[in-house]
Image (spheres, rainbow, N blue to C red):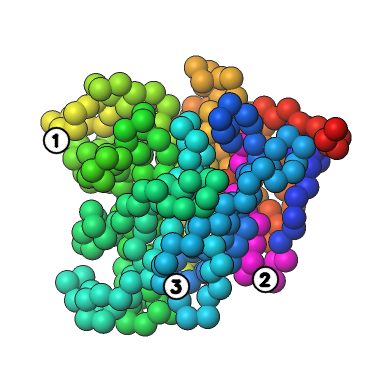
Amino acid sequence: MSSWGDLVWQGPKSDPLSPVQYSNIQFQSLNGSDYLTYWNGYVLEGQNASIGYGNLTVLDKHYEPAAVVCPHLGIHVQAGVPHDCDIDYNEQYLTPWGTLLVTVYNLTQMDLSSVNGSAEGYLLDAQIHEIDIATSESIWKWSSLDHIPLNASQLPLTDMAANESVTWDYVHINSVSPYGTDKLLVSGRHTWDVFAIDRSSGDIVWNYNGIYGGDFGAVPEEATFSWQYHTRVHDFDENFIIFSNFGNHDYAGATGGNAQNTAPTVGREFYLELPASKSYHPLSLNTYNESSSLFSDSWGSFDYLPNQQNATSRFMSYGQLPILANGKPLSAPTTTSRPTGPKRHLGTASPRRRRSLWFCTTEPRT
């Protein structure tokens, strides 16, 4: 829709009673051209996991498909879950070098007794794949089980994760984006970590934990986050990084299905001095909408406005809450939109929403 709330284009519509959904529409660039992308697939909602298995459609300015990306990655899923394509709904990022970064979830059975789980427990191995758009083939893979220990998780196990219905989503990677050309910045919602990952080796270069600091020093109150979404790089060199995320600060799946609402949901921008050191305390550059007392325990996004990289206004989507807001640091939003509809999967909720410049035409090709 336009900035005035007018409908510009409407794509396929989800049936709110069906687990097959359309989601995560985004403005993206590929090889110098602008596109709309959206995810379509099967959404699996569990007590402590929300993931999907589907494809990505790339639309040109005529709203015609330029590509449909449908990788077959040989993963395992819960019995009865269809997965013609294996892209998770959380992340689909078109890279500056012409590939697609996606999140993927592989059902894995393993011994979880070290974290008070079943010796034959079930967890989700959160994976990142880099996909060749033309062929839908995976050209690079990263697995959380290879790099993140089980005890890093902040998510309690349900019934010892003893069967597939209570599979433990121990990391829940929900955003992946380039950090230069040689690294990725990754959000682990269920560990409260932001990870910098080396693309060549797969090693974790550093991690910033929003409560405990990770590879950095003690976290001041104004630089905290937990259960976060949508981590993105905004500036960096070898001595620092500036990034942002959407800090939910709560998750009902971790507290028996009831959100605690202990801290309002906020957007934050962070400054980290590099290389990482326990002697360095992370800094928060700005906090957005802290005064609004809105509580969203899942999904959400926090974006710079188009062509305003150095301005202070930001655009926030409150995920499961049907609220969009423009705002400035530590102030009430300057504009707020509340699309009708109660919550997720009823036509209004989305993992992310974005505001961007979009030049299009509905005229047919000639």
Give the x, y percent position of residue 135. Answer: 52, 50
Give the x, y percent position of residue 292. Answer: 55, 40
In the image as oriented, which residue stretches furthest toward the top? 310
Give the x, y percent position of residue 147. Answer: 23, 54
Spatial CA distance of label 2 from label 3 is: 19 Å
In the image as oriented, which residue stretches furthest toward the left? 279
Mark 3 crowd level (few <14, some 14–19, many ≥20, 10 Å Cα):
some
Q: Are marks 3 and 1 in contact (CB under 8 Å)?
A: no
Q: What stretch is highlighted in magenta?
A: 15-27
Q: Is residue 242 left or right of residue 35?
A: left
Element type at mark 3? loop
From the viewer's side, name the closer residue of 299 and 97.
97
**Residue 156, disc:** none
Task: Tell me which label, 1 or 2, sits earlier in the chain.
Answer: 2
Residue located 75% across and 50% down the image = 11
Task: Tell me which label, 3 or 1, sits earlier in the chain.
Answer: 3
Residue linked to disc 1: 278
**Residue 77, disc:** 3
Three-letter amino acid code at disc 2?
Answer: Ser
Mark 1 crowd level (few <14, some 14–19, many ≥20, 10 Å Cα):
few
| Residue 31 counted in the magenta span | no
Three-letter amino acid code at disc 3?
Answer: Val
Element type at mark 1? loop
Quadrant location of the C terminus in the rendered image: top right
Spatial CA distance of label 3 from label 1 is: 39 Å
Quadrant location of the N terminus in the rendered image: top right
**Residue 18, disc:** 2
Residue located 36% across and 29% down the image = 180
Residue located 58% across and 26% down the image = 32
Query: Secondary structure of the magenta portion, mostly?
Result: strand
Is residue 62 visible in the rendered structure shown here?
yes
